[in-house]
Structure formats: structure tokens, C-alpha cells
Amino acid sequence: MHRRARVTAADIARLAGVGRAAVSNWRKRYDDFPAPVGGTTASPLFDLEEVEQWLAGQGKAPSVADEDRLWRNLLAASGEPAEALAAAGEHLLGQRTLPFDLLRPELDDLVEVHGPVATFDELWRRYAALPAQRSVITPDDLADLMVELAGAAGVSVLDPACGAGGVLRAAARAGAANLYGQDDDSRLTRLADLWLAINGRDGQVRTGDSLRADAFPDVAVDAVVSNLPFGQTNWGHEELGNAPWEFGPPPRTEPELAWAQHAIAHLRPGGRAVLLMPPSVASRRAGRRIRANMLRRGALRAVIALPPGAAPPHAVPLHLWVLQKANRGVAEVLLLDTTERDLEAAYRSVADVVTAFLGSGDRSDFVEAHTVPVLDLLDEEVDLSPGRHHLGDADVADAGPRLIDAGRRLTESAARMPGLLPGLEDGSGETVVSTITVGDLLRSGSLQILGPVRGGEGEQVEGLTLTVQDLTDGRPASGTADDRLNPRIALQPGDVVVSVSERRLVARVNTESDLLLGRQLWLLRPDPQVLDPWFLVGHLCTTVNQRLAGSLLGTSRFDVRRVQLPRTAMIEQRRQGDVFRRLHELTETIRETAALGADITRLTADALASGRLRPV
């Protein structure tokens, strides 16, 4: 019997284009909302067909992609995500007919439209988006960075803890020639092997414990790239105690250093390994002897501290170790701390700095500022934590000129503030103001509303996107649309961008071209002959409208259609709009001044503490 597809409340919210709070309210307000058919009280599951019928009856009919529907049905039929994906992959390869008869035509129809490779990739993305998988899968942008640092293009690559093959896929994207992977979870190696086969990649994936039962004992590769298992307590310390460890037998509490030596042992001379490590490996006392031996023999080239959120566990600032198969020692290593940067900026910095450090060309002063002589590290602790070094050098080397420049900019910002205060007069006599709602303006055609933008579907695009954080922090657009946006909305000067998912309604007038609207944002596009954009933004964010927009659901989500605007002539709109524009500039100037003051305070304290500057 065919089991019907089930969805969570989060899935329903995504299908209907609303927040989860809206789904919760629907369940409370509507007696005919579909009853849960499984799950738990905290995380109920609903029948997908019943949900679609209910949404259609309420005028909220979703457009469910064929891939989404097939994936949900596969999950319902198999009961296990990895099995669902594997069954589809084996059918696409012709290895085994899909065992779910009713779903076979759906899968074949998708293949007819998209081809087997694209169909499998679409199903893979849905598998990887499941909460249980997000907690263990290496994010694509981090995997791409790791294979770039390893120089994987055109060479052979091994991942001794490959899981479902995320790093191997990144190596394939980078143009690796031969791929080898091993993992002790047969469900995951089955998926990794299927991906290689469907995509026509040369590679071998084996099941087994790489440390205890190496599937490739005689294979030497150009690069080893891996997101290692963290904190193993039973990694084979007893069985492998007499193994020929090149840098010394790892203590029981140092499994990561066992993996690091395993990676180096598989490298050809001059080959490079890039491993994702927990930060404690750089400083634990039990591993200091092995770290010292790696330093002395030139095996350890760089340790990079990444910002929190790079990969699970997301709250921990993980490290990347860059190792090499060396036949002689080196004079210095690179210790780079990017923990204070956002991920995108950190990845760009890491790629540039490590490439310059390991390359044969001239290095920049910035690269040199993050190198440390090996002799300086060979002390009692052999602490390789990047944050423990460069405390008084790199950040304050040019403190004097930087303080002068910051002081000049602070003075200029402060001088601009009085001129931005708008001229106003008492209008208390005019107490009756006729209003119109944003919803009325939408119905009359004076205003368009577009969005919100979501991810996970749609075409892949390139360009700069305006994000929720950009809007909240008042900064220029900083996001990249290197993933899929749905829908793809290009911004125009005069558009009003609104975030309705924060604790307060935030809006601003867009003044730039060649930008895309980011996720979780709405766009209001006024008719410039009828509605001034600055007038609209100013009234959107008044205290009264914050309450009106937020009162529908009683949560932190807003319904911008409930916002009320004064009915007024265009000339008066422009006069008020000019006031709101000046107030916006004043707010941004105050924000800039506060940031400069904080920078001056921090830089002065650091420079005084390091002895770079002294009081006069």
C-alpha cells in the first residue's frame, strides 16, 4: 500500500509563502485545518494532499514543484531519507528498478524533462536540506574553499571520512582527476558512490573504518581533503598503538591527530592535506609532542581559525589545518584568525592569504603579518591557536596613521549632523488626517508588492543581493546570489525594500542599480507619479504603523498591507519625503560616528597595550 506524503508545519509555511507563526494560527483559528497524521505534539506531520486541498479552499493554493512532490512521496514510501535517495539513484542508473510502483512514473517523467543527472541533483538538494542532514553535511562553500586550498584541480583527491561525499563533490566541481572516499556508514557511502556514477566521475568509494581498515593502503594522492569526525572516544587507540606513526603515537584523547597523520601518510611528496578540525586540537597538552614534530619536519603549513557558523557545530569557530608531505623543515607557518569576519569575507581572505603564502611569488605585507617563525612556536605548550599570536603586531602596526584618519572622519561626521536636522513648524492645529492603507494602494495600482524571496528553488543566478542584515544594519548590499533565489527580483532606484520578519518593521529606499532582492525581503514599487518613495518609507516605520502592521498575528511578523498613509497631494508628499530622507541620512551619520568612536577606542587601547603608542 502506498503511503501518502507528509509535511511539517515548516514545509506548509514554505509552500504557502508565510511564516511558521501563520501556520500555527491557522491551526488554532480554523476547525477544518487538516489534523496531524503523525509525528509528535511538538513536531506534528500533516498529509500533503489534505494540506494542499485546504490551502486551495482558502485561496492560498501553493505551487508545489514536481521535484518536491516526488521527494515527499519517496520519503513517505521508504521511511528513511538515505534509502529514499539511494532507491531513486539506483533506478536512474538502471541498477535496480524503483521499488515503489506508484512513484516510478513520476520519477521517469522528471528524467524525461531534466535528464538523470539534474533529476538526481534536485533530489539530493532536498535530502541535504533536511534538518538531520544539515547538522552533519559540510556546507558547499566551505567544501569549495577546502579543495581550493588543497589545489585539487586536475589531481587525485582522497577523503578518508567522506560521509555522503560532500567534499568529493566539491573536488569534482574543482576538476579533480581521480576521487577516493571511505566512510564507516554504508548508507552514506552508497549515496556518495551513486553520485559519482550518475555524474560520470572517476572514483572509488569504500565502506569501512579508515584508521582500522584502510581501503586504500597503497594509494598515494596529491590531495587529502576531509571534514574529520570530532571527539571520537573509540577510534582504535589500542589496536593501532604499535602502528608506524610518523610523528608519534597519538594519545587516546587525540583522535584528530591520528587522522592528520593518516592523511599525510596518503600524500605523494609535495602533496597537500586540508582538514577541518575542532579548535582544541591546536592547544591540548596531550598533543603538543605531535604538533612539535609536525612543525620541525615541515608538515604543518597553516592553521586558520574560521568564524562561528562555518559548519556544524555552528557555535564553534572551527579550524582548517593545511598539511603537506615534506622532506625538510620550514622556517615559518601561517596562523590566520578570521573569527571576527563574516563567512563570505573570511573565505575570500583565507583563499587569498593561503594561496600567497604557499605560492612561490612575492608575498604581501598582509600575508607576512600572519606568519610566525617555527622556533617561536616550539615552546612548552606548542599552542597553534591563531588568536594567541599577533596580539601586538598585525592589528596595530600602523595605529598612528589609522587613528589620524579615523579622527578626521569622526570630525567630519559630527560636523554634518546639524545640517541634516529638518526644518519643522507647529502643525498641532491640523488634527484630522484622512488616511489610506497600503492594501488600498495595491488594489488601485498605485503600488506593487513583490516577494518575499525564498531559497531552494528557481534558477541559479549571479550578482549582488541586498540581505536582511544589510537592511537592518543600514549597510550597502553584501550578499551574493550564488545559490538559487525564488523569485529572482531585480531592484530599481526608488523601490522600497521591507523586512517583515524582524522584531520591528524595517524599510529603506533603494538608490542603486544592478542589485537583487535577498531572501525574506519584500519589495514595494510605488508609481512615482502618485506616491513618493521616501514619504512611503517614513510612514511605514512610524510607531502607529508598527503596531498596525504587527497586530494581525500578534507575533514578530508584520502585514505591511495594514499600514496607513495620510491622503495628501504629491507636492506635500515630496516635502515630507525630503524630511524623512534627511532623517535617514542623520541616522546613518550617527551610526557611522558611533562605529568610528568604537574603532578609535579599540585601536587606542590595543596600541597602548602593545607599546606602539604612548601618551604625551
Image (tube, rainbow, N blue to C red):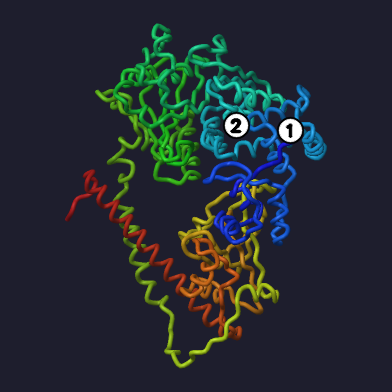
Q: Which residue is mark 2?
A: 170
93 vs 559: above or below: above
Q: Position of residue 210 (x, y in %)?
A: 52, 16
The quarter holding residue 494 reads bottom right
- Which residue in the rendered view is the most extreme toward the bottom? 429
Q: Residue furthest left?
A: 616
Dot 2 lies on which element?
Answer: helix
* Gap in angstroms between the C-alphas marked 1 and 2: 16 Å
* Mark 1–mark 2 CB contact (< 8 Å): no
- Identify residue for label 1: 117
Quarter of the picture holding the N terminus: top right
Left or right position of 113 against 335: right
Residue at image point 79% right, 35% down: 102
Of all residues shown, which one is farthest toward the front?
Answer: 31
Given residues 76 and 263, the one toward you in this image is 76
Q: Three-letter amino acid code at disc 2?
A: Ala
Quadrant of the frame with the C terminus: bottom left
Name the residue rendered at 32%, 26% in the picture.
284
Residue 232 locus on image (x, y percent): 42, 23
Find numbered disc 1 in the image and state the secondary structure of the residue it sits on: helix
Q: Quadrant of residue 329?
A: top left
Specify the amino acid type for callout 1: Val
- Whether 372 is drawn above or below 63: the answer is above
Residue 487 pos. (x, y %): 67, 54
Front in this rendered view, residue 83 or 222: 83
